[in-house]
């Protein structure tokens, strides 16, 4: 990428109001694999319909997610997360469920797909802590973590594991119902109030001369791409920072094939924001 191309993008973003949309590429520097980045294997996550269909699917999901969560919960916000806290955009929209923006101290945030640190019962709709469920799963499956300590991690708190038939899945303590992480699965819709809040923030950019900055998302799914389309249709500049091509490239004013932490730290410095490290509170 020509240096003047990067400079022009930074100049465009230097003084404008910002809405930022982030994806999995922002968390790779925290050790969480990128779902669709360059070199990532093709994967299809479990859909909501598969999850609710039978107990075997729930065993498969929770066994893999139990191991993945044990690793993901130890991840720390990286320089990109801290730079975004310093930039303090009008709104940060994230497609990530890892909770790292929240732990870094982001103030105005919409987690489109929820947070994997929370659990919901599909029966009574009671919500509870993922950390508490993790402890219950460890107690119900003694030695399971140790036996599978070397399995390969995937994005979204998942791992590569085929033998899950014997995994014991605890039920809701309130009603005995099926527990699900409080995140939006494929086949589910993002709650309308979240989408409307994001649309409103993107629409204000056209009124204030702002810009939409996309960091670390391939924009493969519509949940994120729709905001790029909305901004471009209104004539709002769009800058995409991502390793590899994205589905929104043709709509962008600038596309930068560069690391998120590097670019966001430079932007924070350019705007005089710095990138102070906020105290992290572990879920």
Image: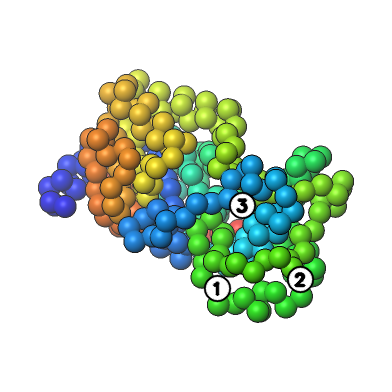
Counting labels gives 3
Nearest to N terminus: mark 3 or mark 2: 3
Q: Which residue is mark 2?
A: 141
Mark 1 or mark 3: which is in front?
1
Q: Which residue is mark 3?
A: 116
Label 2 vs label 1: CA separation? 17 Å
The residue that appears at 55% across and 73% down in the rendered structure is 151
Task: Give the percent coordinates (x, y) of residue 93.
Answer: 47, 39
The image quadrant that residue 280 belongs to is: bottom right
Judge the density around disc 1: few (<14), some (14-19), many (≥20) Cα neighbours within 10 Å. some
Comparing 244 with 112, the one in front is: 244
146 lies left or right of 133:
left
Q: Which residue is mark 1?
A: 151
Task: Give the percent coordinates (x, y) of residue 22.
Answer: 42, 45
Comparing 53 with 92, the one in front is: 53
Label pair 2/1, CB-CB below 8 angstroms? no
Confirm whether residue 160 shows in the render.
yes
Task: Give the percent coordinates (x, y) of residue 35.
Answer: 44, 55
Confirm whether residue 132 shows in the render.
no
């Amino acid at each position: 990428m020509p240096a003047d191309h990067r400079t022009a993008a930074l100049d465009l973003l230097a003084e404008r109001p910002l809405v930022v949309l982030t994806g999995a590429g922002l968390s790779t520097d925290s050790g969480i694999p990128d779902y669709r980045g360059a070199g990532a294997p093709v994967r299809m996550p479990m859909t909501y319909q598969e999850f609710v269909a039978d107990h075997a699917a729930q065993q498969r999901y929770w066994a893999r997610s139990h191991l993945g969560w044990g690793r993901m919960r130890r991840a720390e916000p990286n320089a990109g997360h801290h730079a975004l806290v310093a930039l303090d955009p009008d709104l940060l929209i994230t497609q990530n469920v890892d909770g790292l923006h929240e732990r870094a101290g982001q103030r105005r945030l919409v987690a489109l797909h929820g947070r994997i640190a929370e659990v919901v019962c599909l029966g009574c709709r009671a919500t509870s802590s993922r950390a508490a469920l993790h402890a219950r799963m460890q107690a119900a499956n003694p030695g399971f973590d140790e036996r599978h300590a070397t399995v390969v991690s995937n994005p979204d708190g998942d791992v590569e594991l085929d033998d899950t038939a014997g995994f014991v899945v605890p039920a809701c303590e309130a009603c005995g119902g099926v527990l699900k992480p409080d995140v939006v699965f494929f086949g589910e819709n993002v709650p309308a109030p979240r989408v409307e809040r994001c649309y409103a923030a993107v629409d204000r950019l056209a009124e204030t001369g702002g810009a939409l900055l996309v960091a670390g998302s391939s924009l493969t799914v519509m949940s994120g791409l729709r905001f790029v389309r909305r901004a471009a249709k209104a004539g709002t500049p769009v800058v995409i920072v991502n390793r590899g091509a994205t589905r929104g490239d043709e709509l962008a004013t600038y596309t930068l094939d560069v690391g998120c932490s590097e670019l966001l730290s430079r932007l924070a410095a350019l705007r005089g924001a710095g990138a102070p490290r906020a105290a992290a509170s572990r879920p």
